[in-house]
């Protein structure tokens, strides 16, 4: 059974809050917000993005995370962020970014029978992804250190939050002359989503909630400039980012539920089987497995962040004293 989205989000955020408060209670002096000046950092981020879904993968059975990536399909993410630091161990981040994801069965390296089933399926997709999220950053070395002058150059951190993302998958059809054309898949109801013949297959929304989480290392380049290296993973609650999840349907149902033009496209694009394992086959029987609904789609990025502090830049009393001693003298 798929978990309820509100319950899953609530449990994750509650667990994060309780863990933070529990750790901070060991060093209660760090919980003071009123005595510390809030700092604000703005910047931009970029880095490679990878998709984890039903399409593509490596040789053998489908696995998880890095073991099942097709690196030739690596895409670039770019965006901007603003982070507010009420103290030195906690950050509250808001970010907006754009990326692109893609998956293809024909790119799979074949060494055995397991991956040949996917390659014979021969499906593909691509999609732009827009996302906005907010997250809590926790710096454990700062949380657990009570020295007011402690100001390390490198600060590890972890984060978790909640976001909204928008996607719109497209699939391709290649004609006899080798010309490839891409079509939006959501309106074609490729697995019978929303058709009365398949009441268990509900239409999916193109705008959904995700859970961004991960960790990284923050480096102080100068009193005002920081850079970070970060792993940003997005847990989603949909298996349709690539428009593949359950089973093939009877192609005649496209004619009964779509316009004549869309039905003709859907017939071609929902099943593009090529006869690798079973020579001569070009279509699967209705009900044949098309995807794996037990695992939700996900995507992640390796991120480089560059941030600039606004306002006062020194974190420690010694730094502030050094700044005051370098100011120009007043003669009047």
Image (tube, rainbow, N blue to C red):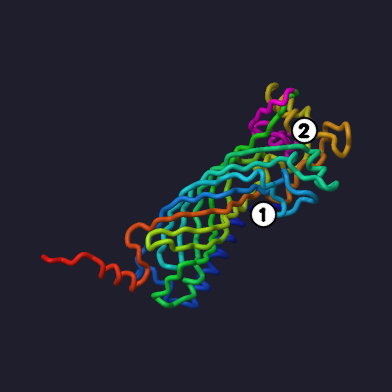
Q: Position of residue 232 (x, y in %)?
A: 57, 55
Residue at 73% x, 39% y is: 199
- The residue that label 2 is drawn on is 272
In the picture shown, does residue 194 fall above or below 230? above
Residue 63 in the figure: left or right of residue 143 = right
Q: Quadrant of the C terminus?
A: bottom left
Residue at screen point 54% across, 53% down: 303
**Which disc, if any, is residue 221?**
none
Above or below, 16 relative to 144: above
Specify start and end residues of the magenta stretch as a single range.
177-201
Q: In the figure, residue 291 lies in which quadrant?
A: top right
- Compared to residue 321, the image places residue 285 above or below, namely above
Q: Earlier in the sequence, mark 2 or mark 1?
A: 1
The verdict on residue 18 being magenta is no
63 versus 271 height, above or below: below
Q: Which mark is residue 3?
A: 1
Q: Element type at marker 2? A: loop
Q: Secondary structure at mark 1?
A: loop
The answer to whether residue 206 is left or right of residue 91 is right
Give coordinates of residue 70: x percent, y percent.
69, 47
Residue 275 visible in the current orientation: yes
CA distance separating discs 2 and 1: 32 Å
Q: Can I make out residue 285 in this image?
A: no
Q: Main secondary structure of the magenta part?
A: loop
Percent position of residue 100, x then y: 59, 42
Q: Is residue 117 left or right of residue 316?
A: right
Residue found farthest to the right: 279
Q: Nearer the viewer, residue 211 or 104?
A: 104
Viewer-closest of 98 and 132: 98
């Amino acid at each position: 059974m798929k978990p309820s989205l509100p319950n899953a989000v609530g449990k994750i955020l509650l667990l994060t809050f309780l863990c933070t408060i529990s750790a901070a209670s060991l060093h209660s002096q760090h919980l003071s917000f009123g005595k510390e000046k809030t700092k604000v950092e703005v910047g931009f981020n970029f880095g490679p993005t990878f998709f984890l879904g039903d399409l593509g993968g490596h040789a053998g059975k489908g696995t998880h995370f890095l073991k099942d990536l097709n690196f030739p399909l690596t895409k670039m993410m770019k965006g901007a962020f603003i982070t507010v630091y009420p103290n030195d161990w906690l950050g509250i981040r808001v970010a907006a970014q754009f990326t692109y994801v893609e998956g293809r069965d024909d790119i799979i390296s074949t060494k055995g029978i397991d991956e040949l089933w996917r390659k014979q399926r021969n499906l593909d997709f691509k999609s732009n992804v827009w996302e906005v999220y907010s997250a809590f950053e926790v710096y454990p070395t700062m949380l657990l250190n009570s020295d007011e002058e402690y100001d390390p150059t490198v600060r590890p951190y972890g984060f978790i939050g909640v976001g909204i993302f928008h996607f719109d998958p497209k699939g391709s059809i290649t004609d006899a002359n080798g010309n490839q054309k891409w079509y939006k898949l959501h309106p074609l109801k490729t697995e019978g989503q929303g058709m009365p013949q398949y009441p268990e297959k509900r239409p999916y929304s193109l705008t959904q909630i995700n859970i961004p989480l991960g960790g990284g290392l923050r480096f102080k380049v100068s009193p005002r400039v920081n850079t970070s290296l970060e792993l940003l993973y997005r847990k989603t609650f949909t298996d349709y980012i690539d428009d593949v999840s359950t089973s093939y349907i009877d192609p005649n149902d496209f004619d009964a539920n779509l316009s004549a033009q869309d039905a003709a496209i859907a017939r071609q694009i929902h099943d593009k089987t090529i006869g690798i394992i079973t020579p001569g086959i070009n279509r699967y029987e209705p009900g044949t497995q098309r995807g794996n609904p037990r695992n939700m789609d996900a995507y992640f990025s390796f991120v480089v962040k560059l941030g600039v502090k606004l306002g006062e830049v020194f974190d420690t009393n010694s730094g502030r004293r050094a700044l005051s001693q370098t100011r120009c003298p007043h003669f009047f």
